[in-house]
Image (cartoon, grey):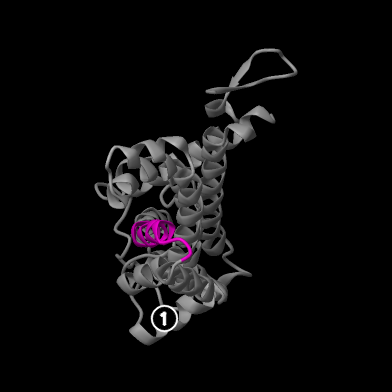
């Protein structure tokens, strides 16, 4: 079923025209486009200081104003988007690949010792507050973008492991799986050729949601000085540096804060729209 019935109008309403998907896709594409453009162009160097231009408000010359060192805030936000998305992509990649693999193994060994070990470990990891665990891990390993990626990626493991296991168990009960067994395929072949393709959609939806959370976590770590390190711009560290000037130069906090909020909102709405597309029950109920 590719479209939901619009009961009010009597016609078909495609999922990709839903407000969640459209707004989420537009915001996400805008952030990604800004990050990609920053590789080839920014109005000014995001690390070049100009003390004579320090703490200037938004203008035609500096669209978002300048910070306490005279750096262009808009240029810093552009490069900060690149760093935030890189951390989010790396962290979600680690969590998705390793977590999905563990979840599929647990589904194959359901009820066995390996299944219990994987799931109890996931439950144990999931029981701790994610941000506090990331702070602890980066504090032990040392601050930096790579350590932030690893820390946030490890925290994504239980989400993907539990989701992959639950979805895979549903697929394993289908008739075509029994047909594949009768054809002589082993568990590994069935998992790769039949189970994984059938759960890929919900994993992508979860990835968009976890991506938004990873961006937020990276901003929190950078705010505490444990994430992206100077001179690389970071939205979280920009918020930290703006604290002193909140009363007199509020734009220093408003613009990076808005960038974080719009990025998280965009990917969450995108995930919601994709979920509507993948789950036919949601489409039929609208």
Residue depicted at 46% across the width and 44% down the height: 171
Residue 109 position by quadrant: bottom left
Does residue 37 appear anywhere in the picture? no
Residue 21 position by quadrant: top right
Residue depicted at 48% across the width and 68% down the height: 119
**Quadrant of the rendering where the N terminus is positioned:** top right
Pick the front one: 121 or 212 = 121
Residue position marked by numbered label 1 in the rendering? 137
Residue 85 position by quadrant: bottom left
Residue 235 on image: x %, y %: 45, 63
Main secondary-structure element of the magenta-colored stretch: helix
Residue 191 on image: x %, y %: 34, 48
Q: How many marks?
A: 1
**Mark 1 neighbour density, 10 Å: few (under 14) some (14–19) many (20 or more):** some
What span is in magenta? 93-111
Identity of the residue furthest to the top in this view: 10
Residue depicted at 45% across the width and 54% down the height: 164
56 versus 183 height, above or below = below
138 versus 115 height, above or below = below
**Quadrant of the rendering where the C terminus is positioned:** top right
Identity of the residue furthest to the left in this view: 40
Residue 117 on image: x %, y %: 44, 73
Pick the front one: 108 or 129 = 108
Residue 204 on image: x %, y %: 43, 45
Residue depicted at 34% across the width and 57% down the height: 97
Judge whether residue 108 is colored magenta. yes
Identity of the residue furthest to the front in this view: 182
Pick the front one: 129 or 42 = 129
């Amino acid at each position: 079923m590719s479209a939901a019935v619009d009961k009010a109008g009597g016609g078909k309403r495609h999922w990709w025209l839903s407000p969640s998907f459209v707004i989420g896709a537009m915001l996400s594409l805008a952030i990604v486009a800004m990050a990609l453009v920053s590789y080839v162009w920014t109005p000014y160097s995001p690390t070049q200081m100009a003390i004579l231009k320090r703490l200037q408000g938004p203008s035609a010359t500096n669209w978002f104003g300048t910070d306490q060192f005279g750096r262009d805030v808009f240029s810093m936000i552009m490069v900060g988007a690149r760093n935030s998305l890189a951390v989010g992509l790396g962290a979600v990649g680690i969590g998705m690949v390793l977590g999905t693999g563990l979840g599929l193994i647990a589904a194959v060994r359901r009820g066995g010792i390996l299944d219990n070990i994987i799931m109890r470990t996931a439950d144990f990891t999931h029981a701790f507050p994610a941000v506090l665990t990331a702070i602890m891990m980066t504090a032990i390993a040392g601050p930096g973008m790579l350590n932030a990626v690893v820390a946030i990626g490890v925290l994504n493991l239980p989400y993907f492991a539990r989701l992959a296991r639950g979805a895979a168990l549903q697929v394993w009960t289908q008739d075509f799986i029994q047909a594949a067994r009768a054809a002589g395929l082993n568990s590994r072949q069935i998992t790769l050729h039949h189970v994984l393709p059938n759960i890929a959609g919900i994993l992508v939806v979860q990835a968009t949601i976890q991506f938004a959370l990873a961006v937020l976590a990276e901003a929190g770590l950078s705010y505490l000085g444990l994430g992206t390190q100077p001179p690389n711009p970071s939205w979280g560290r920009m918020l930290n540096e703006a604290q002193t000037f909140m009363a007199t130069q509020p734009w220093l906090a408003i613009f990076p804060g808005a960038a974080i909020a719009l990025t998280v909102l965009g990917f969450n709405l995108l995930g919601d729209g994709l979920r509507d597309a993948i789950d036919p029950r949601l489409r039929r109920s609208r």
